[in-house]
Image: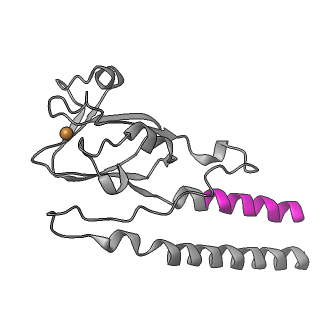
Amino acid sequence: MAARIMAALACILVMLRLSEAAVYKVGDSAGWTTIANVDYKLWASTKTFHIGDTVLFEYNPQFHNVMRVTHPMYRSCNTSKPISTFTTGNDSITLTNHGHHFFFCGVPGHCLAGQKLDLNVLLPASSTPLSDPPTSSSPPPPTTIPAAGVPGPSPSHAASPPSVMATRIIAVVALLVSLAFTNFAS
Ligand SMILES: [Cu+2]
């Protein structure tokens, strides 16, 4: 019966991880730009992307855009046939499938200057061993620092995670307690 509780706990943990969709602001406080010399490859390597997560590109649309492209286009900074183009300056893109996602800025010269991003979205966690959770110590969500001259700070999206997490933990504990009781009764 201890094994049953452990199995139930494992299932719950997997469900918790799958349901936790994260929002990643590309480049953190620097955003999507050429002037801050952001190493987007390094930025992406510090994150673990899952299906359902969102990447947010924040930039001045007068100077930049976002193109999603194929791998060959990404490598050669070829802007001729993007899969899709985003131009609002505040583009949220939800990652709906696993594997590599390639983006760059389509303004001439910007991709060559390093404004390009290769995200690797991992397969669902159910296939990974539970004994070694490498993503459990993920960094806190990036704080939004409004750039000088850009109006409208948006501090809203950093507010809820702790309380949501607490609610989930309480739900898990309650479930475990009820499981333990049913096992004692049987
Ligand atoms: Cu650009």
Q: Is residue 183 above or below residue 92?
A: below
Residue 18 occupies quadrant: bottom right
Can you tell which quarter of the image residue 29 is in? bottom left
Locate ligand 1 by image quadrant: top left
144 vs 90, left or right, is right
Write the residue at 15% across / 34% down. 107
Residue 168 left/right relative to 92:
right
**In this rendering, is residue 163 above or below 68?**
below
What kind of colouring is applied to the model shown? one colour
Foreground residue among 39 and 70:
39
Magenta run includes residue 170: no
Q: Position of residue 24 (x, y in %)?
A: 40, 54
Considering the whole magenta stretch, tell me its main secondary structure: helix
Above or below 154: residue 64: above
Q: Position of residue 173 (x, y in %)?
A: 71, 76
* Residue at the extreme left: 62
Quarter holding residue 2: bottom right
Residue depicted at 44% across the width and 75% down the height = 160
- Magenta range is 2-15
Give the image location of residue 93, x and y in percent: 31, 49
Image: 130 above or below 105: below
